[in-house]
Image: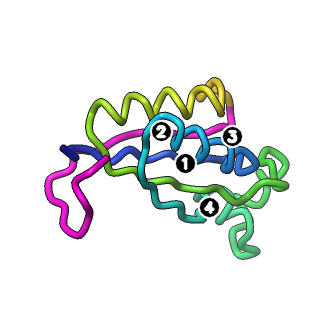
C-alpha cells in the first residue's frame, strides 16, 4: 500500500545513475526525476540581487543544478530507499550532498498498486 512520498534532492548529480541503480536493486519500481535548482543558487544568478550575489564566493557555482527524485511508496519501501540514498550519497549532513524527507500520501490516482 502506498502511504508516503519520499523526496530526495540530490546535489551530487554525478551520483544519479548509481542511486537509481541502487533503488532498482532494493525493489523501488518507479521514481520521477526532475531537474531543480536551490533558491540561493537561483538568486545568485540574478544580477539584480546584489546582496545575494555578494555571497557568490560561498556557493559552489560549479554545481548549481540538483535532481529531485519523488518515490511514491509504502513505509517499508521508504526505509529501503532511504538506506539506498545513504549508501550511495554518504553522510547527508555534509554540505551539498542531498536532502531527504517524506510526506504522507492522502490521495493517489493513476498509479498501479504493485511496488
Q: Nearer the viewer, mark 2 or mark 4?
A: 2
Earlier along the polypeptide chain: callout 2 or callout 4? 4
- Per the image, the residue denoted by label 2 is 100
- Per the image, the residue denoted by label 4 is 37
Residue 93 lies, in percent from the top left, at 60, 26
**How far apart, in angstroms, are the residues tagged by discs 2 and 4?**
15 Å
Q: Which residues are magenta?
A: 95-115
Other residues around mark 2 within 10 Å, as few (<14) / some (14–19) / many (≥20)? some
* Residue 79 vertical position relative to residue 33 in the rendered view, above or below: above
Task: Determine which of the numbered discs, if any, sits on residue 61 in the image.
Answer: none
11 magenta-colored: no
Left or right: where 23 falls relative to 91: left
Earlier along the polypeptide chain: callout 2 or callout 1? 1
Earlier along the polypeptide chain: callout 1 or callout 3? 1
- Per the image, the residue denoted by label 3 is 96
- Residue under the image location 42 percent in, 30 percent down: 80
- Per the image, the residue denoted by label 1 is 9
Amino acid at each position: 500500500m502506498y502511504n508516503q512520498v519520499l523526496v530526495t534532492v540530490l546535489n551530487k548529480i554525478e551520483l544519479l545513475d548509481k542511486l537509481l541503480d541502487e533503488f532498482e536493486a532494493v525493489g523501488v519500481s518507479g521514481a520521477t526525476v526532475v531537474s531543480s535548482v536551490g533558491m540561493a543558487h537561483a538568486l545568485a544568478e540574478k544580477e539584480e540581487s546584489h546582496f545575494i550575489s555578494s555571497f557568490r564566493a560561498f556557493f559552489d557555482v560549479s554545481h548549481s543544478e540538483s535532481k529531485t527524485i519523488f518515490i511514491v511508496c509504502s513505509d517499508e519501501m521508504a526505509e529501503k530507499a532511504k538506506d539506498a540514498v545513504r549508501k550511495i550519497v554518504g553522510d547527508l549532513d555534509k554540505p551539498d550532498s542531498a536532502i531527504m524527507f517524506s510526506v504522507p500520501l492522502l490521495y493517489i490516482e493513476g498509479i498501479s498498486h504493485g511496488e
